[in-house]
Image (tube, rainbow, N blue to C red):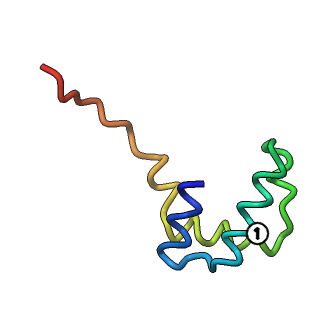
């Protein structure tokens, strides 16, 4: 839900779209259920994901540094 909140905060989703997608995800409870989201909501979520560069973040290697000495 944090990502959805960020999409709304950056105005990539409207408040209504945010609420509808959040409700769908809450009800769906499984990846298969989420994938059955209505196409209009899925397109909005997909576009917001591209604009937020979610795939780019996931393709970056993890930071392997430690603040501990």
Location of residue 18 (image quadrant)? bottom right
Side (left or right) of 49 relative to 60:
right
Side (left or right) of 25 relative to 46:
right
Q: Could you tell me residue 6's position as x and y percent?
A: 50, 65
Mark 1 residue crowding within 10 angstroms, few (<14) / some (14–19) / many (20+): some
What count of labels does the image hold? 1
Q: Which of 46 and 67 is in front in this view?
A: 67
Residue plotted at (23% across, 30% down) = 65
Q: Could you tell me residue 67's position as x and y percent?
A: 18, 29
Residue plotted at (77% across, 60% down) = 23
Q: Which of 41 and 18 is in front in this view?
A: 18
Q: In which quarter of the image is the N terminus?
A: bottom right
- The single residue placed furthest to the left in the displayed view is 69
Q: Could you tell me residue 39's position as x and y percent?
A: 83, 70
The residue that mark 1 highlights is 20
Q: Nearer the viewer, residue 16 or 68?
A: 16
Instruction: For mark 1, give the secondary structure.
Output: helix
- The single residue placed furthest to the top in the displayed view is 69
Residue plotted at (58% across, 64% down) = 49
Q: Quadrant of the C terminus?
A: top left
Q: In this view, does 25 lie above or below 65?
A: below
Q: Could you tell me residue 30's position as x and y percent?
A: 81, 42
Residue plotted at (71% across, 61% down) = 22
Q: Nearer the viewer, residue 24 or 61?
A: 24
């Amino acid at each position: 839900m944090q990502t959805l909140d960020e999409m709304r905060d950056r105005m990539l989703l409207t408040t209504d779209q945010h609420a509808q997608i959040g409700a769908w995800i809450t009800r769906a409870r499984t990846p298969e259920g989420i994938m059955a989201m209505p196409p209009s909501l899925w397109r909005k979520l997909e576009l917001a994901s591209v604009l937020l560069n979610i795939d780019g973040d996931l393709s970056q290697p993890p930071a392997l540094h430690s603040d501990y000495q």
